[in-house]
Image (cartoon, coloured by chain):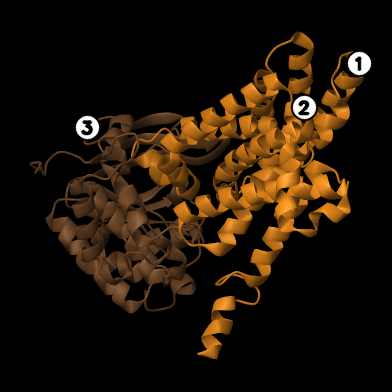
Chain colours: A brown, B orange
Amino acid sequence: METINYQNFRIEAENICVDYNGKVALYDANLRLKPGQICGLVGMNGAGKTTFFNALTGFVNISKGKIRINGESVRSAQKDQTIAYVPQNEGIDSQFPISVWDVVMMGRYGSMNIFRCPRESDVQAVKDAIERVDLTDHLSTPIGNLSGGQRKRTFLARAIAQRASILLLDEPFSGVDIRTEKLISELFIQFKNEGKTILLSTHDMIHVREFCDLVLLINKTVVAYGETSEVFTPENITTTFGGISPDFLFGPES
Amino acid sequence: MELCSFLTLDSFITDPLTHEFMRKALLMSSLVAAVCGFLSSYLTLKGWALMGDAVSHSVMPGVVVAYALGLPFSLGAFIFGVGSVALIGFIKQKSRVKEDTVIGLVFTGFFALGIVLVSKIKSNIDLHSILFGSPLGISLSDVKQTIFICLLVVILLSIFRKDLMLYCFDPRHAKTVGINVFFLHYLLLTCLSLAAVVGLQSVGIILVVAMLITPGATAYLLTDKFDNMTVISVLSAIISSLIGIYVSFWFDLETGGSIVLAQTFIFLFAFLFAPRYGIFKLKKLFAGYK
């Protein structure tokens, strides 16, 4: 087991910029997260949440700035299986002919040989991960036959099987049932205790208050960042959402 | 053709086998169909049908130039196949024209260039056989080259089978865990260009895209497991090419067209009667009887 130094940063993003063919998607964004921290990423559609994730995973290149993952480059983070990405349900082809087992096994691909032959340890990791998300009865179910919540849990299991120390979750609570929501929140507590770092994007203000130690409000760049209790104010949220009040966006309860 | 002689199924099948060109055509077309069928699972899942059409048309000038220069035609096809995709990507990035328009524009341009080149370069290239295929008139050097390409594609696909599946399913995850997505993208493109070039001998350049998408689409309707999909796709491709060649032999029909039509009929059958995804859902019908 790796020893976790809770003082070192897991994620350090300094003044990062991303543009797609000259169109700026994100500029001067900063983020620093330590082990065991859960950070909420909040912003409008098109505010750069997915772009931020893509930059951290190396799926897009940053045009300016610096990203360090556990003090090293994104490239070596990829090699070390440091980051796991859990996509939105809409981000995946649910009709793809693939079973729960196969999806979770994909979490192990990065550490397998070139033919991706599962070793005993891989099989065990996949079994354990599936058990933790309570899908043992659905090992060979095609993902197309799962509910939204079950599918979300499948991808969480993939991240668990990968044994990543950083989890990026894109809208983990959208379109899931109560049972899945409860299971995910229990997993969050476990992940926190294991010293994993979590960055999650969400539309739901209640979840931010409930789970996130820190919050990062973005609108193409960082609007506000800090402890949820200090930063997650109606004024900041209004600025993030381009002047629309949170009451109007999310109902009076938020 | 002596129509009376296939009163028995036996002679329907064995009579054509007495001709050497038929044995060769059946063998080579099955091999080509198997390779295209294998690749077809990936292309249909990746949503590359239009890309397949583009690449298969774009290889035309490459084939012509290679013939004229006495180079292996697969080399020319490969350069133009991958080149067309690079050009599509470049134009898309540098202009505001939508992707499907760019694809249509580039491949028709390449195709037209091929046709013009054929008419200009006086050689023994038979335009008809490039456009519509000539599995019955395949030469010995073509046989060797086809076998070589087919083996190469099968080996590449077999080695990177799982990575390509992951690439089609979730490229973002692949990238996150350090798998070379750029390499996989071009690997799939390379296989596509090579398959197009062997496929065009069987059914011709215009119909080769059918070899690359129909078997995969058929298999997609019949299973929820990726490995089964590949097997079904390969089998349906081989069966279609055998049916196509036999039918074209006995009824004196264009061979390439017959092969593709056979594939289309198999697809239609799956579309109507596939157990889970067919219109009539046979499984449910049977369940109703119990």
Calculate the distance from the C-alpha at mark 3 to the C-alpha at mark 1.
62 Å
- At horizontal 87% and vertical 21% (from top left) the residue drawn is B118
Q: Residue under circle 1?
A: B120
Task: Quadrant for residue B179, please give it.
Answer: top left
Q: Which chain carries label 3?
A: A
Q: Nearer the viewer, residue A103 or B64?
A: B64
Q: Specify the amino acid type for callout 1.
A: Lys
Calculate the distance from the C-alpha at mark 2 to the C-alpha at mark 1.
14 Å
Q: Residue under circle 2?
A: B60
Circle nearer the viewer, 3 or 2: 2
Residue A62 versus residue B13 in the image, above or below: above
Calculate the distance from the C-alpha at mark 3 to the C-alpha at mark 2.
51 Å
Question: Which secondary structure, mark 2?
Answer: helix
Q: Position of residue B55 (x, y in %)?
A: 69, 34
Q: Position of residue A170 (x, y in %)?
A: 39, 56
Q: Where is residue A205 in the image (x, y as percent from the top left)?
A: 36, 68
Q: Mark 1 lies on which chain?
A: B
Q: Specify the amino acid type for callout 2.
A: Met
Task: Quadrant for residue B277, please give it.
Answer: bottom right
Q: How crowded is the residue under tag 2: few (<14 C-alpha within 10 Å), some, or many (20+)?
A: many
Proximity of marks 2 and 1: CB atoms separated by less than 8 Å: no
Q: Quadrant of the C terminus of chain A?
A: bottom left
N-terminal label among 2 and 1: 2
Q: Residue under circle 3?
A: A71
